[in-house]
Amino acid sequence: MKKIFGIILASALLFAAGCEVHHSAGGILAVEHVCYEEPPFYTYADYCEYYSGGTCCGWYVYDMNGTPCYEEWCEWDPTCGWEYEAEFCPLMY
């Protein structure tokens, strides 16, 4: 019973982190990144950075102690789409 509960808990945590969980015939847990074809928000990005391997954009999500915080999403593989990269609140001086 503990093993089943552990698998369910691990699956829920990975799902919340933006991963899909797949169980193979051997019982080994495999994790894949989830990608979205469209940008993750309905508004224009607050910023975008262009790299040779892809594009990363950030969207404002909330304030923490008066500092704006952003979610950054990247499109590294055009066949996959947008992947969640990080959430951060830059220091304001």
Image: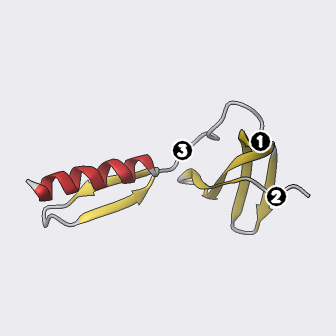
**Amino acid at pointer 1:** Ala
Mark 3 lies on a secondary structure that is loop
Residue drawn at point x = 73 percent, y = 48 percent = 58
- Label located before the other in sequence (1 or 2): 1
- Label located before the other in sequence (3 or 2): 3
- Name of the residue lying farthest toward the right: 93
Question: On the image, numbered disc 1 is attached to which residue?
Answer: 45
How far across and how far down the image is residue 46, in percent?
Answer: 81, 43
Mark 2, Cα crowd under 10 Å, few <14 / some 14-19 / many 20+, is: few
- Label located before the other in sequence (3 or 1): 3
Horizontal side of residue 88 vs 23, given as left or right: right
Kindly report which numbered mark, 1 or 2, lies closer to the viewer in this rendering: 2
Residue drawn at point x = 42 percent, y = 46 percent = 16
Question: On the image, numbered disc 3 is attached to which residue?
Answer: 36
How far across and how far down the image is residue 72, in percent?
Answer: 68, 52
How far across and how far down the image is residue 22, in percent?
Answer: 27, 55
**Amino acid at pointer 2:** Leu
- Say which mark, if any, is on residue 91: 2
**Amino acid at pointer 3:** Tyr
Horizontal side of residue 72 vs 1, given as left or right: right
CB of mark 1 within 8 Å of CB of mark 2? no
The image quarter containing residue 60 is top right
Q: How far is the residue under mark 1 from the one under mark 2?
A: 20 Å
Mark 3, Cα crowd under 10 Å, few <14 / some 14-19 / many 20+, is: few
The C terminus is located in which quarter? Answer: bottom right
Q: How far is the residue under mark 3 from the one under mark 1?
A: 16 Å
